Image: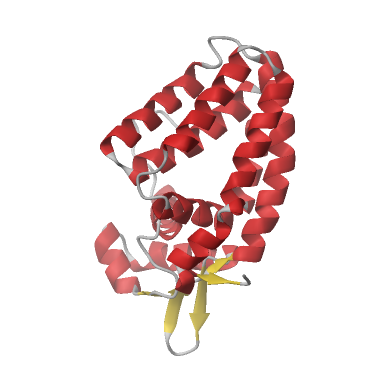
Amino acid sequence: MDSTEEPSADEQPDKQQDEAYEALRRGIIEFEFLPGQRLSAKEVREGLGLGRTPVREAIVRLQQEGLVYTKAKSGSYVSLVDMKSAECAHFLRCHVERAVVREAAAQATPESLALVSDEIGRQRQAVATHSQKDFFDADNAMHEAIYQVAGRSLEWAWLERASVDLNRFRWLHVKARGVGWQSILDEHEALFKALSDHDTEEAAYLIDHHLHVMLDEKEEVLSAFPDYFRNC
């Protein structure tokens, strides 16, 4: 379809459903909608400016992913963070990402590392402005960029689909730290140096340590947000 053409009548509902789904999914991951909170379809429709059908279908998709559950005669609710699921995704990511950073370090060029550098710059800015959301977004984008350097974008997309509860935990990990994100930024900068130097062993060591620290501080997160988790 030519980029100047308007979506057809058949395409518009799918576009609206995707819009509703992405907005709700991001809102759940970033705790705009809290675990256990009832999702009022009417309030969601009014907030997004969308119709009944795309919002209903988006909620069905989120139920299939386990982010939403339904109580009979009561409505739809945001699921608690499943810690077992988060730990499973973390295990997979640690093993996959260690291999990915080795490949990235071996293949890296100044051009391919430019996006990684840009995202670390965004993190510095987020630390300076105390923006949790900006830091979280730039952190995630940096890791995705490393997969791109290694030619592993499909692997990143697969992990992201399987890591919803891990990403929710990561968001709370950032919040629990308050403004103490400098240590994370320092680790990212050290990793970037290893990638730039084509030091595959150092890059693998750094990413292994970096990813393990997240769950090493699990109790701090659980203590800060005790009502948000199940299967702890």
Find residue 52 and report its image quarter.
Answer: bottom left
Find residue 180 and report its image quarter.
Answer: top left
In the image, 177: left or right of 49? right
**Where residue 12 sits in the image (x, y, percent)?**
39, 50
Q: In the image, what residue occupies the spot 70% across and 30% down?
A: 205
Front-most of 150 and 169?
A: 169
Reply above or below: 158 against 35: above
* Quarter placement of the C terminus: bottom right
Q: How many marks?
A: 0
**Where residue 112 sits in the image (x, y, percent)?**
56, 15
In the image, 166: left or right of 1? right
Q: In the image, what residue occupies the spot 61% across and 52% down?
A: 216
| Coloring basis for residues | secondary structure
Q: In the image, what residue occupies the spot 32% across and 30% down?
A: 125
Asked if residue 101 shows in the view, the reply is no
**Where residue 177 sits in the image (x, y, percent)?**
42, 50
Reply above or below: 121 against 60: above
